[in-house]
Image (cartoon, rainbow, N blue to C red):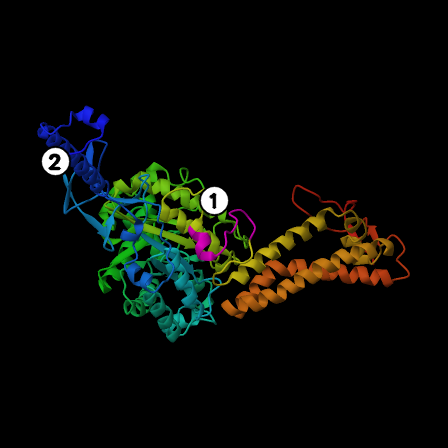
Amino acid sequence: MVCRRPFRRLIRCSGTRKMCMDLLFILLFIIALSVVVSHLHASLPVRHVSNGMTAIDDEIRPVDRFANNDYKESQQKNEPNFIVNDNQVKDSFKGKFLDDGIGNKREKKYINDVPYPMLSSEGNFIPIQRIVHLDLKGGAYRPYFFDEIFQLLKNLGATGVLIEWEDMFPYKGRLAAAKNGNAYSMEDVHRILSSARNHGLEIIPLLQTFGHLEWILKLEDFSHLREAAAYPQVICFASEEAMDLIKEMIDEVFAVHFQYGLNYFHMGADEVFQIGYCNSSLKVLQREGSKEKAMLWHMARVARYIRSKKNISVMAWHDMVVQASEEDILFYKMPDLIEPVLWSYAEQLDQYLSPSTWFNLRPFKKVWGSSVYKGADGPMQFHSNPIHYIRNNEAWIEQMTNNYREFEYLQGMVLSGWSRYDHMAILCELFPVAVPSLAMSLETLIRGRKLDGEYSYTMNLLKCLPPVRPGFVEGCNFPGKRVYELINEFNNQHEQWQHYLRNDFELNGWLSNVAVKYRSSSPMYLEKIVHFIEFYLITLEKLETDLRDELGKIYFNDTVDEFILTYMEEDLNTLRQRYKAAMDMIKQRHFPKRPFIELVSSLPLRYSDNGINSKNDKNVFVDRA
């Protein structure tokens, strides 16, 4: 055997020291084996010790445990999915049972075949079910557009849709008199639900059965069913006629949804502002003993009716239930009948979802959360402001993480998307305007943490990175992108025009309301002003034309007209009025003699009982033109 001199000296290698060489080979073998074992161990589950409890936490990618059951199938079709590769999640329950370290055993739990709970590598709660709310009581889509919406939602990582039909459902019988003139046909409804099912989305109907029944109660034919005669919001819930009407709604919606798989039914029941006004409800209130008990009595019987048709989960908004005592909640068997949906749309939730709110719902084994992606930033908010909604979803991560252990299941998250604050309110953000905030909110929930502007999957899917604050970016690729661009461009022009209207020196000096009304001003200044007016007018008229074209592809004509009337008409009318007045006065060669406004000394007006009450008030003006 040949050895280098230093090496031979080290091991005293010689022909007579074979034992030394044997030991060396054994040592090298042990080292090699250790390296292999270490490498294999790195990929095995890691045992963590936390709070005195030992659990095997299998660090895996969400792709392996993604809530969408058909993930592998969609990957084979090369469809994009909102999968967060760098967000590790861990299964708190491994094997059939988990020993918590003090002798108690918990059975392994699942939601939709996904191990529960799903946690991020930071230990934050990730909702397995992510349901996107489609509110059709404003801005209802043309039937074909649902296909594009459902494909988008699937790609963004949503697992289901909560469809609030309201007056767009093709009701029959008595309810036919209340449905929208543009209501879908039954063929449309089947096509919509079939599309949702084909995209692998859970389909949940939302039907208001207590408050927010303005779409029915506003009409003369149903006004006698109001809880309070002056307000068309709450139904006279204890009336048998009212209950029969509620059953008819449930029956018709249930019948068609049942054909496409029905695991959940949302009965609404939020913001019930009037209780105990109509005679029937007043009698129930007196019999049950309080408003809270009367409310639970009604919710319980509606939930029982829904469950009598099929033993499914009935969801209900939490804000009325949480007002009741635990004793009353248990007396009416509410935990056996409903799953509360805690909703709050603020940026800071500690004030609105205090520990006492969660504590009051502890009798329930299953609860949901509800964040928001549109329709909760002011009733007249029509343009993009994603940061409000992102912060709300960030706050929900903290709320869920802090409270999920208090319940058997925190079922998931409903991302609400309101089209109006209620049936009688104006349109707020339309769906295309809200797509970026929806995408970034879903990415935030799926990754289980604040992303601080790093929305890589939103950018990949939408082919752009929209700003999180008011504003927009061109070149995105999603359904309705031109509506998103045009509405935000209009908002920019609107703000510029309003700034000019409030602050311009010449405009306010020589084209005021007085100048316009009495056609009295200086043509020299008007010749300068009119060019600015014309610029804004041409720009807004072009935007109006383009918006009508693009909105009409997605929405019915009445929605297009309502949006233009609500948000653009005032600017357009002001510009047209000012432009015409300026052009008239530029051509005008003579102007009226002052005074064209005179004070009067005798005007029999009484402004208030303790205010102005004088026939000689010098602040009263009269038009003398």
Q: Is residue 297 visible?
A: no
Picture residue at 22% right of the left edge, 27% below the top? 5
Residue type at tag 2: Gly
Mark 1 residue crowding within 10 angstroms, few (<14) / some (14–19) / many (20+): few
Q: Which corner quadrant of the image does residue 308 belong to?
A: bottom left
In the depicted structure, whether residue 53 falls above or below residue 232: above
Q: Which mark is residue 103?
A: 2
Q: Nearer the viewer, residue 293 or 431?
A: 431
Q: Which residues are magenta?
A: 457-472
In reply to whether residue 465 is colored magenta, the answer given is yes
Residue type at tag 1: Gly
In reply to whether residue 399 is colored magenta, the answer given is no
Q: Is residue 373 left or right of residue 405?
A: right
Q: Which corner quadrant of the image does residue 53 belong to?
A: top left
Q: Is residue 367 visible?
A: yes
Q: Secondary structure at mark 1?
A: loop
Q: Which mark is residue 358?
A: none
Mark 1 and mark 2: Cα distance apart in space: 45 Å
Q: Secondary structure at mark 2?
A: loop
Picture residue at 61% right of the left edge, 57% below the top? 490
In the depicted structure, whether residue 130 falls above or below residue 452: below
Question: Mark 1 = which residue?
Answer: 453
- Main SS, magenta region, reads loop
Q: How far across and down, in percent of the image, does residue 166 sit? A: 41, 64
